[in-house]
Amino acid sequence: MIDTGYRESMEKRFGQKARVIWLTGLPCSGKTTIGSGLSEALLERGFFVRFLDGDATRKGLCSNLGFSEDDRVENIRRVAEISKLFMESGMITINAFITPTEPLRRLASEIIGRENLISIYVNAPVEVCETRDVKGMYKKARSGKISDFTGVSAPFEVPAAPDFEVDTTTSSPEESINQLIEFLIPLIKREL
């Protein structure tokens, strides 16, 4: 059973509404850049924030998982459960994960609670993402060296109804972060 009194007391102490901000988009769309920048911007404004992304969680929490469909589901399940724990402690969690399908997004929402989740679609077409790919993953996927790569050999479903969308082809990372801050502050600031 969730101790809602603890969460509420921590939210009051932090002066914020604990939420999970979930950024989804293709590989190299800008999720991690925007998520880490958003985290820094919110910390500078006095919010208590934790940033999670795929690279960090796959080195520890999810290091035993591959990229099969079952492993992708388990990866998102674990991240959602950890995010929920942070949220129940009064924290704002910013997640940057591809989360390529509606069933995966629904799983995260069901674990966290729809009322606690703010979904952000980081929009960039695959052609643009490929030009940003410093690791060469798209090239490897197109040559068959990586199988089940989202956007090439595995599907990415555009979110049906995100709470907010940033288009990283028309906005710089700084502009995208500023747009998000303007949108998020009323949703996460708690009056003392």
Image (cartoon, rainbow, N blue to C red):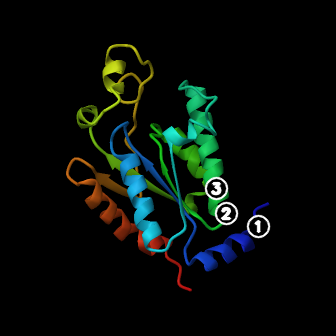
- Number of other residues with Cα within 10 Å of mark 3, as a class: few under 14, some 14 to 19, many 20 or more: many
155 to 50, vertically: above or below: above
Q: Secondary structure at mark 2?
A: helix
- Number of other residues with Cα within 10 Å of mark 2, as a class: few under 14, some 14 to 19, many 20 or more: many
Q: Which residue is mark 2?
A: 88
Q: Is residue 130 left or right of residue 157?
A: left
Which corner quadrant holds the N terminus?
bottom right
The span from disc 1 to disc 3 (Cα, nearest Å) is 12 Å
How many numbered marks does the figure carry? 3
Quadrant of residue 73 in the image?
top right
126 to 159, vertically: above or below: above
Instruction: Please tell me which residue is depicted at 30% across the width and 21% down the height of the picture.
Output: 139
Depth order, front residue of 53/123: 53
As drawn, the residue found furthest toward the bottom would be: 192
- The amino acid type found where label 3 is placed reads Lys
Earlier sequence position, callout 1 versus callout 3: 1
Q: Which residue is mark 1?
A: 3
| Residue 35 on image: x %, y % | 42, 53
- The amino acid type found where label 2 is placed reads Glu
Q: Which residue is mark 3?
A: 84
Instruction: Please tell me which residue is depicted at 55% across the width and 46% down the height of the picture.
Output: 106
| Residue 40 on image: x %, y % | 43, 62
- The amino acid type found where label 1 is placed reads Asp
Are the residues tagged 3 and 2 within 8 Å (C-beta)? Answer: yes
As drawn, the residue found furthest toward the top would be: 144
Q: Secondary structure at mark 1?
A: loop
| Residue 76 on image: x %, y % | 57, 40
- Number of other residues with Cα within 10 Å of mark 1, as a class: few under 14, some 14 to 19, many 20 or more: few
Are the residues tagged 2 and 1 within 8 Å (C-beta)? Answer: yes
Q: Secondary structure at mark 3?
A: helix
The span from disc 3 to disc 2 (Cα, nearest Å) is 6 Å
Instruction: Please tell me which residue is depicted at 37% across the width and 67% down the height of the picture.
Output: 181
